[in-house]
Amino acid sequence: MLPYLIKVTNNSLSTVLAMSLLLAVLYRSEPAGKKTYLAWGAAIGAAAALIYAVLKRTTGFAVREYYDLGVLLPSIAASIGLLFTFSFILFARQAFTDSKAYRFVLHFFALWVVAGWTGYTLPDLLLYPFEFAVGMDTIFNTDFMYKVIGYLLALLILFLVGVAYFSTASSNKLPPRLIFPTLTLEILVMAAFEAMTVTQILLGRNMIPRYKWLMKPLMWLLPRVDGFMYALMALALGLCAALFVRVKSAALEGENPAQRRKAKAGAKRQVRWGATVAAGLVFSLLVVTVGQSYANRTVELSPPVELPAADGKVFIPLENVNDGSLYRFVYKASDGTGVRYIVIRKSETGYGVGLDACDVCGASGYYQRKDQVICILCDVVMNISTIGFPGGCNPVPLKHAIKDGGIVIETSTLESEKRRFK
C-alpha cells in the first residue's frame, strides 16, 4: 500500500495545489460565465496523456522524454504569458482587464497551462494500475488489494486537498493582494521544475552542450527536487494560516441576528476548508518523508552459507532447515560466480527449494518478514506454499531430491544457473 501512496502523492500533489489555486483565482477574477476554456485545457492534457499511456502499453514507440518535451515546453511558455497577463489585473484599469482582447489572451495562456500540467501528471496515474499485478499469478491476493488501496487512498486525499484548497482560495476573506502573489510564486515554482526537467532531458539526449554554468546548478537541484513540492506546500499552508487569522480577527457583519449567524456559519465553513488543506498537507508530508524513509529502508540480510560439495552434490540436513525460517545458501561455480539458493520448510514433509532469484526481478533475492517471504526488489509477498513452483515472482525452482535425511542438489544444476547471478 505504502509504495503507491508515495508514488501518487509525489507525482500529483504539486499539480493539485497549483491547479486548485489557479482555478480559484480565475473564478474569482473573471465575470460570471462558463469557463469552457479550462475544460478544453484539461481535455487536451488528458487526451495527450491517454494517447501516450496507450502507446506505452501497446507499442515500443512511446518515449516519455520526448513526450515530456512536447508537453512541458508549451507549458513553460504559457506560464510566463499567464504571469504577464495576471499582472494587469493588479495594475491596469478595470476597463482594460474587462476587454475581450485581454480576456482572449488570458484564456489562451490559462488553457495551455492547464493542458500542460494535466498532460504531464496524468500518464503515470494511468499507468500505475498496470504495475499492480507484476510478479503475481493472480490478482486475488492481499498484496494486490493493498496496492489498489494505496493508489485509491492517495487519489482520494489529493481530491480532498484540491477541493479544500480551491474553496479556501475562493474565500472573500483573502484579498487579491494576497492571492495573486501566492499564485505567482506557485506558477514560478512549477515553471522552474518544468525548466529543470526539460534541461535534464536535453542534456541526457545530448541536444544541448554540457556547459559548466548549466551543469552546476542542475547537479545541485536534482537531489533536492522534492524542494519544489515542499515550496508549494509551504505556500498553501501560508494561505491557510492567513485565512485563519483574517477570519478570527474579522467582525461578524449583519443587520440582524440571522445575518450574523449566517456570517458566523460561513466563517466556520471557511476555517474547516483551510483545516482540511492543512491536515491533508501534513499527512502528505508524512507520506513523502517518514513513509518514503520506511519504504526505502535497507533490508539487512545475513550472508548466505556456503556448503561444501562432495561427489558433485550439495547436501543440506533437514534438521538444519526444519523450523520454518528462510535459509540462504551459496554455491561457488567453476568460474567463481556465487549461485545463491534458498530453502524453507512449507509443511511437515514439504520443502520449498529455489534460486535466490526470479524470472521477473532477476537476482535481487528474497527475505523473510514474520511468516512471509518477500521479493527485495518489488516487495511482492510470496505464498510460501508456492515456493518451489514456477510462475510470477516466485523463486526459480531448483531441481533437488530428499533422501537420507537431507536435501540433495546436483552441482551441475547449480552450475547451469550461474548466468542469473553474473
Image (cartoon, grey):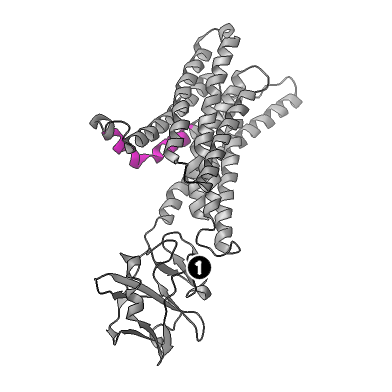
Question: Which residue is nearer to you in this view: 229 or 280?
Answer: 229
Q: Where is residue 125 in the image (x, y as percent from the top left)?
A: 54, 44
Q: In the image, is residue 292 above or below residue 277?
A: below
Quarter of the image with the C terminus is bottom left
Q: Quadrant of residue 363?
A: bottom left
At x 52%, y 50%, the residue is 5
| Residue that label 1 marks | 391
Q: Position of residue 257 (x, y in %)?
A: 75, 25
Amino acid carrying mark 1 in the image:
Gly
Q: In which quarter of the image is residue 224?
A: top left
Q: In which quarter of the image is residue 51?
A: top right
At x 41%, y 68%, the residue is 367
Question: Which residue is nearer to you in this view: 316 or 142?
Answer: 316
* Left/right of residue 386 with respect to residue 34 in the rendered view: left
Q: Where is residue 405 in the image (x, y as percent from the top left)?
A: 41, 91
Q: What element carries label 1?
A: loop
At x 34%, y 37%, the residue is 205
Residue 170 within the magenta-colored segment of the rendering: no
Q: Can residue 376 be seen from the camera position used here?
A: yes
Q: In the image, is residue 164 above or below residue 341?
A: above
Q: Can residue 170 be seen from the camera position used here?
A: no
Magenta residues, start to end? 216-235
